[in-house]
Amino acid sequence: MRRGAGLALVVLGAFLLTGAALVRFYVAERVPAARLDHYAVVATEAAGATYFDPATVSVRTGTVRGTTTIRGDAGQGGDGFAVWDSFTALVAADGAPVLYFEERAAHDRRTGEAVSCCGEFAGDRGPAAHRGQVFAWPHGTQKRTYQVWDGLTERAYPARFDGADTVDGLAVYRFVSAVPPTPGQTRALPPKLLGAEGEDDVPVTLWTGAARTYWVEPLTGTVVNAVRAVDQEYRAADGEKRLTVFRGTLRHTAEQVAGDAATARRGGAQVRALTVTVPLGALALGAIALAAGALVLRRASRLPAGGRGPAHAVLSGDAAPAAGSR
């Protein structure tokens, strides 16, 4: 009986120890951070922005609100990568459209790095070769420099670690990235839009620059907050004739920050459960079970065959007769 109980405890201990290793080094490492059917809406706002209003054919100043909808294309994704589409719209306070931008990209579900696949594009210029972090940051973000994609210029730029910070009570890493003024598509505009004289349209190039700051929860790679100062304008070849398209600093709204922080907390709890709580708990219980099983087996091995000890022998009348009993 004792031997059977000891063996059962040893088997249980071995099972728990093996399970601890599997959860920590196999399951936790293979749980992807990005969902194939991901859906999110990101709300931003730029107070005091300058923008071109096509309805009034003039440059105006005021609050601009942005909405970026990100939707996963589950049918195109796979075990190791996800395909997401994003739709960004900037509108003035009175509803006047300021900017609209669409993008499609595939990325590694755990590292967030771009994967060339599935009809990727950026804006209205056709296919784009995405690089670096596109929609997501790594599951386990480190204190180092990452290449972060910018859809408006169709390039990836370094985002360097700028220190630890706290957002909504959550520990995060801060990264900063500069997008230098970069030429884009060309077109022709009426000279009056550029403050020029004449009747012939003037060839211009769209230039875009930005300064970006990200606050990333490192365990899950969740962007808890972001600020993007964008400067976009049309420039003529002489560099003097210009037309502002959008100049402003887009910030995540307070509601957006609170919601993303809550998401990061839930995700962080799941990560800690898989990497710390469950493995350590199983490791401790497994060690206890092994030790208890070994102790039971050791005590059982000291008993004579059949489990009969000295007391059992005396009670059975197997002891030698006492002197003078005959």
Image: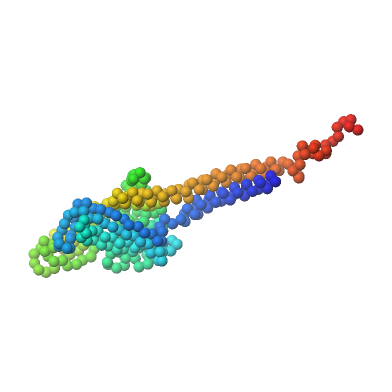
Outermost residue to the bottom: 200
Seen from the viewer's position, the closer of residues 53 and 205 is 53
- Which residue lies at the image location 14% right of the left edge and 60% below the top edge? 58
Q: Is residue 326 left or right of residue 97?
A: right
Outermost residue to the left: 197
Seen from the viewer's position, the closer of residues 312 and 175 is 312
Query: Which quadrant does the C terminus fall into?
Result: top right
Residue 262 in picture, x, y percent from top left: 37, 49
Outermost residue to the right: 326
Residue 7 in picture, x, y percent from top left: 65, 48
- Which residue lies at the image location 21% right of the left edge and 53% below the top edge? 63
Seen from the viewer's position, the closer of residues 92 and 303 is 92
| Residue 213 visible, this angle | no
- Which residue lies at the image location 21% right of the left edge and 66% below the top edge? 186
Colour mode of the rendering: rainbow
| Residue 29 visible, this angle | yes
Answer with the quarter of the image where residue 72 lies: bottom left
Residue 190 in picture, x, y percent from top left: 13, 66
Q: Is residue 91 above or below residue 281?
A: below
- Which residue lies at the image location 29% right of the left edge and 63% below the top edge? 102
